[in-house]
Amino acid sequence: MKAVHFGAGNIGRGFVGLLLHEGGYEVVFSDVAAPLVDALAAADAYTVHEVGAGGVDREVTGFRAVNSAEDPQAVADEVATANVVTTAVGPTILRFIAPHILAGIALRDPDAPPLQVMACENAIGATDQLRAEIVELAGATWDALEGRVVFANTAVDRIVPGQPADGGIDVTVEPFFEWAIERGPFDGDLPSIPGAHFVDDLAPYIERKLFTVNTGHAATAYHGARAGFERIAEALADPAVAASVEAALEETSALLAAKHGFPADELATYRATILERFRNPALPDTVQRVGRQPLRKLSRHERFVGPAAEAAERGLSTSALVAAISAALAFSDEGDEQAVQLQALLGELDADAFTQQVTGLEPAHPLFPAIRSAVAEHQAA
């Protein structure tokens, strides 16, 4: 069996690639970073170091690497004969890998089992997004190709912090992971992924993850950065930061209970587990790394505005989520393009224009006034 994985970064090697290897696949990493591709091509193995309670070292072997920028034909050839294609490139990069996947589908033997494609991104419906890009590129040829591939949405969760500069291709991760995959598209022929669980309805699981893990992680980063902390674990050790993050997650849990019917005690246990993971002192995770790309994180369907907008529409509390958004407005990092753009927009636009442009909310939306007030207060200060 063979899996082609797009994105040979820390998540690709330390999470997706690891589980594919343990599932019996030969893993072919595809990336555009030449030094990383060369390092993988020159290695026979790398180690995933799980740090924290119960963590062990896991060795990954039987992999190869190709440079999609330098040799797109090689990537297409690998996709054409693969069983599985996965991604961990970021939602905005999916459109750039879609041509490689389409080229591989076009070369695929029509009698071969369908290629199983799963985008493992921190976004709702990322595989649907990738499929849409591929279908658009295919145009009139898609009808002839559609039977050669199936697409399944996933929800993935594992903290993979920034790695030491001298770490090579080894990866440090937390022991916990979760990979939920929608069952329906596979028609009973499930991919071999140890530890993954297949569900009939993915939406509750992906929203629980995004609105708890992603919301909580980013809220910790922004509240922590504003309070002057460097590391995520240090920030959550501060009672004020911890209380702010917990309050935000109580609001997202209220939405999840109302929308998906999750029991309150189950959500409370889930929140506690998530916060305990963030407190893992063995993870060298920083507020700057987690807080990067604030404009994306403040956009309409992301981890703050997404759940807060739905909560406001249901008449639920959003004050703690708005407080996290307010903390995000103060985030500054000269090395992060979006952080620089965020501060520039705060200086260029008035509160109404900024709120509408950055959050995607219309002025008539019930959440708009609260965020607009937070923006105005930040600008005044």
Image: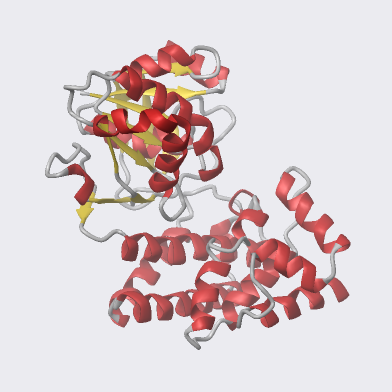
Q: What percent of the width, then of the height, locates residue 163?
A: 54, 37
- The residue lying furthest to the bottom in this view is 315
- Identify the residue at image location x=48%, y=79%: 251
Quadrant of the rendered image containing residue 108: top left
Q: What percent of the width, then of the height, locates residue 282?
A: 46, 49
- Identify the residue at image location x=46%, y=44%: 160
Closer to us: 136 or 63? 136
Relative horizontal placement of residue 3, taking residue 249 as reference (left or right): left
Q: What percent of the width, then of the height, locates residue 355?
A: 72, 69
- The residue lying furthest to the left in this view is 188
- The residue lying furthest to the front in this view is 140
The C terminus: image quadrant: bottom right
**How many numbered circles are shown?**
0
Closer to us: 75 or 146? 146
Q: How is the image coloured?
A: secondary structure
Q: What percent of the width, then of the height, locates residue 102?
A: 40, 27
Relative horizontal placement of residue 175, taking residue 72 as reference (left or right): left
Closer to us: 246 or 346? 346
Closer to us: 21 or 350? 350
Kindly tell me whether residue 7 is visible in this rendering.
Answer: no
Q: Is residue 146 above or below residue 278?
A: above
Q: Is residue 202 above or below residue 8?
A: below
- Identify the residue at image location x=80%, y=78%: 377
Kindly tell me whether residue 98 is visible in this rendering.
Answer: yes
The N terminus: image quadrant: top left
Q: Is residue 188 above or below residue 316?
A: above
- Identify the residue at image location x=53%, y=63%: 303
